[in-house]
Each structure stands twice: as structure tokens, then as C-alpha cells.
Image (tube, helix red, strand yellow):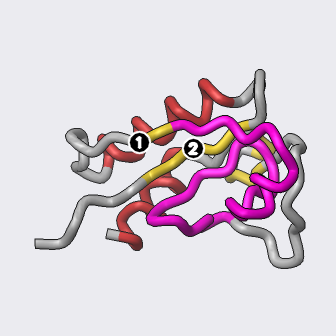
Amino acid sequence: MKPALEIEVLVVPDCPHRQLAEHRVRQALDAAGLSATGYTTRVIAEQAEAERSGFTGSPTILIDGRDPFAQPGAVPSLACRIYRTPDGPAGAPGVDELRRAIEAAG
């Protein structure tokens, strides 16, 4: 049996998109049939921690330690992050994009 996915939502302090990202992660897990799978949220407050975590903006969603939405050449920083979604720019990936990333990692 494959080990459970490890999903982590990384945010800067007071990130305005934290709740949106957490809500979409939960929706994507449910849509992927992984309702029992949880996730953690970690606040990134220092540049050195951003560099260690591969954090390229808030929110960053890691699935098994990997950012499936990483942009080539993005540098670690304590900044806001905007995602391209089918509905236009957003503060978090769309539920369908997240579900596909979760399923691909599973």
C-alpha cells in the first residue's frame, strides 16, 4: 500500500489567500476521493526559510514536498503569489488543477 500523500500549504503571515487555498485543497482532496487525507499549513516568515522550503510566494502548495505549480526561474521570496486558472488570475490554484496534481502524485 502506498503511503498517504503529504500536502502542505505554505503562507506568509496574514496571507489574504490562505483560506481560499486551504478551502480549495480540501475540495480537491474530496473530489479525488481522498476525504480522509489531511494537510498542514505552515507560516513562512523569514527569507532563509523561504529558500529552504522552495517557497516562491504565498500561498505555495506542496504535494509530497514538490510544488506542482512552480514557475521556471521563480526565486524564493516572501511575496504574494498569483496563479493562472481557467477563470483568470487567482490567489490559489483552481480545484480541478489541484485535484489533477493530487491524483498525479498519488
Residue lying at the far bottom in this picture: please name it: 72
C-alpha gap between disc 2 and disc 1: 7 Å
Q: Between 72 and 9, which is closer to the camera in this rendering?
A: 9
Per the image, label 1 sits on a secondary structure element best described as loop
Per the image, label 2 sits on a secondary structure element best described as strand
Q: Residue beneath label 1, please?
A: 39
In this picture, residue 19 sits left or right of residue 75: left
In this picture, residue 33 sits left or right of residue 44: left
- Measuring from the top left, give residue 47's x and y in whole percent: 87, 51
Q: Between 83 and 59, which is closer to the camera in this rendering?
A: 59
Q: Between 1 and 32, which is closer to the camera in this rendering?
A: 1
Residue lying at the far left in this picture: please name it: 1
- Report the amino acid beneath label 2: Val
Q: Residue beneath label 2, please?
A: 9
Kindly identify the residue that appears in the image at 48 percent across and 61 percent down.
63
- Measuring from the top left, give residue 58's x and y in whole percent: 76, 42
Kindly identify the residue that appears in the image at 67 percent across and 50 percent down.
60
Q: Relative to 6, is 15 above or below?
A: above
Give the quadrant of residue 3: bottom left
Report the span colored magenta: 41-69
